Amino acid sequence: MSFVKIDIKGVDELTVDIIRLREGASFRWPKEILNVSSEMMADAIRDEAPRGLTGALASSVRVEGGGDTRRVVVGSPYGVKVNDGTGPSPGRYVRAIGKRIKGGTHPGTRANPFFDRAVSMVTPRIFGYMHRRMYEYLLE
C-alpha cells in the first residue's frame, strides 16, 4: 500500500492567528479544508494514474483517516512499482540444470511518476481554495 501525505505547513499557526482576530467566533473551516483538499488530491491521483485494462490502480485510491489527519492511499499493491518503476530481473533459476534461464530476464519498467504529477497539479488549487475560504471567513 502506498500513500501521499498532505502536510500544508503553517495552517495551524494561521488558524490560531485568525482565531485571535475573530475572538469568540466559531471556527470550522480547517476541517472542511482538510476534507476538501484530501479529496482533491485523491481525485488528482485517480486522474493521473495510468489506465490499464481494468483501471484497478485508479479505483484503489481512497482517503483514510479522521480527526486532524487524512491519508490518500493507493490500495493497489503495484502502485509504488508503477510510480517508481522496476529494475531488470535476473531470470528464473532452474534447479534441475543448476542455472538461470537467460530468456527469462525482464528488462524492467520505466517509472511513471503519477504521484508527483498529481501533487504538483493539485497543490495550487488547494492553496487557492484555502485563500478563498479564509477571505470568506474574515468577511463573515
Image (cartoon, rainbow, N blue to C red):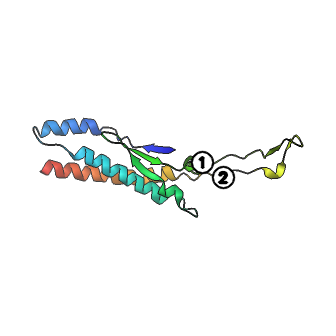
Please indicate whether residue 15 sits to the left or right of residue 37 in the image: left
Asked if disc 2 and disc 1 are in contact, CB closer than 8 Å, the reply is: yes
**Viewer-nearest residue: 125 or 99:** 99
Label 2's element? loop
Residue 49 visible: no
The residue to which callout 1 is attached is 81
Q: Position of residue 47 (x, y in %)?
A: 46, 60
Badge 1: how crowded within 10 Å, few (<14), some, or many (20+)? some
Residue 15, above or below 114? above
Give the residue type that dot 1 points to: Lys
Camera-side mark, 2 or 1? 1
Please indicate whether residue 25 sits to the left or right of residue 50 in the image: left
Q: Which residue is drawn at 15% across and 48% down?
A: 138
Q: Residue furthest right?
A: 97
Q: Residue furthest front?
A: 96
Please indicate whether residue 50 sits to the left or right of residue 40 in the image: right
Q: Residue 109 carries which label?
A: 2
Q: Which residue lies furthest to the bottom in this view?
A: 53
